[in-house]
Amino acid sequence: MDSEEKIRQKKASRRRFFKGLALVTGASVAAYADARYIEPGYIEVSHHTAYLPDLPLALDGFAIAQLSDIHYGPVTPEKTIREAIALAMREKPHLVALTGDFVNREVSEAERLAPLLKPLAAAPFGMVGCLGNHDYKSGGNPITQTLERAGVVMLRNQSKLLASGLYVVGIEDTHNGHPDADKAFAGVPESAASVFLTHNPTGIFGAASRKCVALSGHTHGGQIRVPGFAPRNAADMEGFPMVEGWGKFDKSRLFISRGVGMMHQPFRFLCRPEVAIIVLKRGDKKPTTKRNLAERAVGAAEEGAIKLFHKLAR
């Protein structure tokens, strides 16, 4: 090989290197911009149908809007919280379920959040909630009292009869609280249909023997998903088999929301915030999730982004 050919090969190699570097740099900048400025406020309204064999026929079609992990505080923009509430109420739910981590840690955050929640009280059956691990950091009682003044019925190892034959049951957080599912279900007849609220998905183990629909959060769906790696679960949920969506545990069905807010860092990547609409139907079937055309298009774009990252990584 002559010296001129060697020079040409070196130049070609350099061009390939800088082209690859430009692609990787461009993709990294785009990913950062998406994770920091786009996804945290790009809320998905997900639609689900869940079945309860003992649901009274009169309540067939009962709709619940679930908001989880609002995390009012320094990381989650108030604008995102307002939009999530507006999107939830646009769906005209019968009930709003708030599954914990209302705040980052301070009672003052709950006091600022409380007025934002008031539109949710327009739901015919109002608002119900359970505490999350962050809600105990300034004491669970002050947070509970502040939220109850805003109209949220807080369930701490308690149940509430929503309508004839349908109960909502909530427990304290499994990490920082004192959960007692047996106490919570004590007044609920075996023949009644029930919706179970537990901030931490591991709370399902206390209610798995009941034919209930359980709603939870805590995981943020992983919050930041790195292509090629499994979503990271919460530190206190090591070994739990899922970070979002539906799962079956004995006789119960559990749904994990990706939540509204963020924790630690103001980033979400391939893991949009979520407002979940769960419609209850009488029956004994597997839950279903329906995504409209726009959401399917976003899902396809996310898959494309993952493939691109894999390609650039090679």
Image (cartoon, helix red, strand yellow):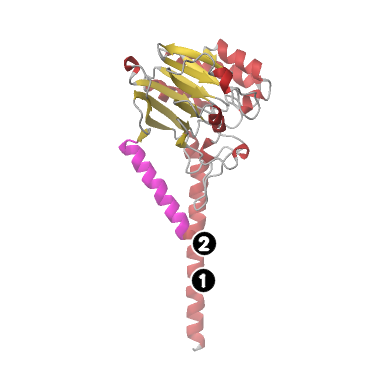
Residue 294 quadrant: top left
Q: In the image, is residue 167 above or below residue 209?
A: above
Mark 1 is on which residue type?
A: Arg
Judging by the rendered image, the residue that carries numbered circle 1 is 14
Residue 159 sits above or below residue 250 on the image: above
Magenta span covers which residues? 291-311
Q: In this orientation, which residue lies closer to the viewer: 196 or 283?
A: 283
Badge 2: few (under 14), some or many (20 or more) residues near its Cα, within 10 Å? few
Vertical position of residue 112 compared to residue 101: above or below: above
Residue 297 as seen in the image, left or right of residue 147: left
Q: Earlier in the sequence, mark 2 or mark 1?
A: 1
Our reading of the magenta stretch's main secondary structure is helix
Q: Is residue 179 visible?
A: yes
The answer to if 304 sits in the magenta stretch is yes
Seen in the picture, residue 268 relative to 208 is either above or below; the reply is: below
Give the residue at x 40% y 26%.
Answer: 278
Instruction: Tell me the SS state at disc 1.
Output: helix
Residue 21's mark?
A: 2
Instruction: Using the numbered discs, state the Cα–Cα distance from disc 2 to disc 1 in whole angstroms.
Output: 10 Å
Please, what secondary structure does the residue beneath circle 2 have?
helix
Looking at the image, do the residues carrying marks 2 and 1 touch, with CB atoms under 8 Å apart? no
Residue drawn 41% across and 11% down? 163
Q: Amino acid at mark 2?
A: Leu
Q: Nearer the viewer, residue 144 or 216?
A: 216
